[in-house]
Image (cartoon, helix red, strand yellow):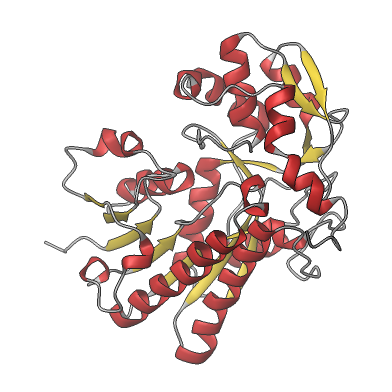
Amino acid sequence: MTAKKIAVVTGGAGFVGSHMVDLLLTRGFGVRVIDNLVGGRAENLAHHARDAGVVLDERDIRSLSADDSLFEGATYVFHFAGIGDIVPSIEKPAEYMDVNIQGTVKVLEAARAAKVAKTVYAASSSCYGLAETPTAETHPIQPQYPYALSKYLGEMAVMHWHQVYGLPVNAIRLFNAYGPRSRTSGAYGAVFGVFLRQKLAGKPFTVVGDGTQTRDFIYVTDVARGFLAAAEAPVVGEAFNVGAGNPQSVNRLVDLLGGETVSVPKRPGEPDCTWADIGKAKRLLGWAPQVSFEEGVASVVENIDYWRNAPLWDQASIAEATETWFRYLTNPARTA
């Protein structure tokens, strides 16, 4: 009997990470998850509680040693762990740099010592900033806020470990992922979590600006497939966009969810459109999205109770949560 291949998933109790675990199990992998459960939720893995193929290690990635036993014998490492909320990064830049960069270095060193076949890093399309669209991987890098910078510097570390140490790596520059189990943290952030809680409460959707801004929403199971393709493909040392390549307006999302709206101010530093050029992933990874926006939103609504205990945002609380963001990013030269 052939032994199972092993995959390590950092942040595997989180949104994308838990769907990565699902996919790996269907492909016959044994899965080791490391997650400190600050952003992730143990119940995201509860349906695997009796599955001998999943191990949950409740640690911070910054505690990893180079010879950490969690990585021993692993074929692949999928690195999702980190701080994912965007807005609070303007107030806590040092924490984001510590977790998202130094934590990534700890993962890289453990992967290097274990001689894993491939490490795939969850990078962010926020590295492109206020980008021209559609946006290819060759677009200039211009992060607009600390979260974006921390994720890009993490990506640079990943590529440096490939260049210097020969560690086989790829990076996925993820666009606007959505789907069941998306974050329900206390921080103001992703539109789906905000809107779904408002829908459950019968409150109006707080639409930024006039709602005509578009986002390249990509369903989470398509994201997980992209990461696995980046691990299994022979190509190394590359960054790939993963999005739907089909931007949808916030107003279209409101139409699909159904409900009244109120307006909140548009945030500086946020693009009017995100739009992934996914030609490189199609060509080199053989990957393409499969779930339409309409199908994806319907699936999320079917699982809407997941967001019942998420924060309920309104115009006043959003204004308070984004005050520092406006103060610094309206005038980037300001230092105090």
- Residue for point 84% across, 29% down: 211
Toward the front, the furthest residue is 336
User: Relative to residue 116, is residue 133 drawn left or right?
Assistant: right
Look at the image and tell me whether residue 236 can be seen.
no
Percent of width and height locating residue 282: 64, 59
Percent of width and height locating residue 92: 59, 55
- Residue for point 62% across, 17% down: 198
The image quarter in which residue 14 lies: top left
45 shown above or below 314: below
User: Relative to residue 51, is residue 139 drawn left or right?
Assistant: right
User: Relative to residue 140, is residue 157 drawn left or right?
Assistant: left
Q: Nearer the viewer, residue 277 or 8?
A: 8
Toward the bottom, the furthest residue is 164
User: Relative to residue 63, is residue 251 drawn left or right?
Assistant: right
Q: Nearer the viewer, residue 176 or 307?
A: 307
Percent of width and height locating residue 144: 77, 59
31 shown above or below 235: above
Q: Quadrant of the C terminus?
A: bottom right
Numbered circles on residues, count: 0
Toward the left, the furthest residue is 1
Look at the image and tell me whether residue 187 can be seen.
yes
The image quarter in which residue 73 lies: bottom left
Percent of width and height locating residue 256: 70, 19
Q: Quadrant of the N terminus?
A: bottom left
- Residue for point 37% across, 63% down: 61
